[in-house]
Image (cartoon, rainbow, N blue to C red):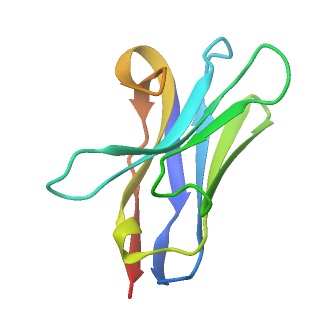
């Protein structure tokens, strides 16, 4: 079974930086999408960034317009596990949210061509002005 565990997050001032990490275990390598999402209480979850693997060459990256140019998604593999990272620079108070990593799976919620079915428990990010 796919399991995701986030770490990182915390508090920062506007203009500062934070990094998030997510270890993905049990991942099926025929699945191609990993991503980061965020949610503020009372609002719908929104996509932040995703990686979509391709048969050859580098994976495709996508960023939500609100974070493009400030956030960077990346991934690495080690001992059968995948680590998904999100580097967040030039943070804004509106970036305050619970951040979740997610991986592709059948019956998942679709975002930019990827069905995200497996989710971590989330890590809180708070940005003060």
At 43% across and 42% down in the image, what residue appears? 120
Residue 7 picture quarter = bottom right
Residue furthest to the right in view is 57
Position of 113 compared to 56: left or right? left
Q: Residue furthest front?
A: 65
For residue 99, above or below residue 74: below
Vertical arrangement, residue 42 with respect to residue 94, above or below: above
Quarter residue 109 falls in: top left
Q: Is residue 87 visible?
A: no
Residue located at (37% from left, 76% from top): 93
Residue 46 placement, left or right of 80: left
**Residue 62 can be seen, yes or no:** yes
How many labels sit on residues? 0
Please tell me which residue is depicted at 64% across the width and 51% down the height of the picture: 85
58 with respect to 52 (left or right): right
Q: Seen in the image, is 28 located left or right of residue 102?
A: right
- Residue 89: image location, x then y, percent: 61, 70
Q: Is residue 41 above or below residue 31?
A: below
Q: Quadrant of residue 68?
A: bottom right
**Figure quadrant of the C terminus:** bottom left
> 76 or 43: which is nearer to us?
43
Image x and y of residue 9, in percent: 50, 67
| Residue 83 placement (x, y as % from top left) | 68, 43
Q: Residue at x 43, y 26 (%)?
A: 116
């Amino acid at each position: 079974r796919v399991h995701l565990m986030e770490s990182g997050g915390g508090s920062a001032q506007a203009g500062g930086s934070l990094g998030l990490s997510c270890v993905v275990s049990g991942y099926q390598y025929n699945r191609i999408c990993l991503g980061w999402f965020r949610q503020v209480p009372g609002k719908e979850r929104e996509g932040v960034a995703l990686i979509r693997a391709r048969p050859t060459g580098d994976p495709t990256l996508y960023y939500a317009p609100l974070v493009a140019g400030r956030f960077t998604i990346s991934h690495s593999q080690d001992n059968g596990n995948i680590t998904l990272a999100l580097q967040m620079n030039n943070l804004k108070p509106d970036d305050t949210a619970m951040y979740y990593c997610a991986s592709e799976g059948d019956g998942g919620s679709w975002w930019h061509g990827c069905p995200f079915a497996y989710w971590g428990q989330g890590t809180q990010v708070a940005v003060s002005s």
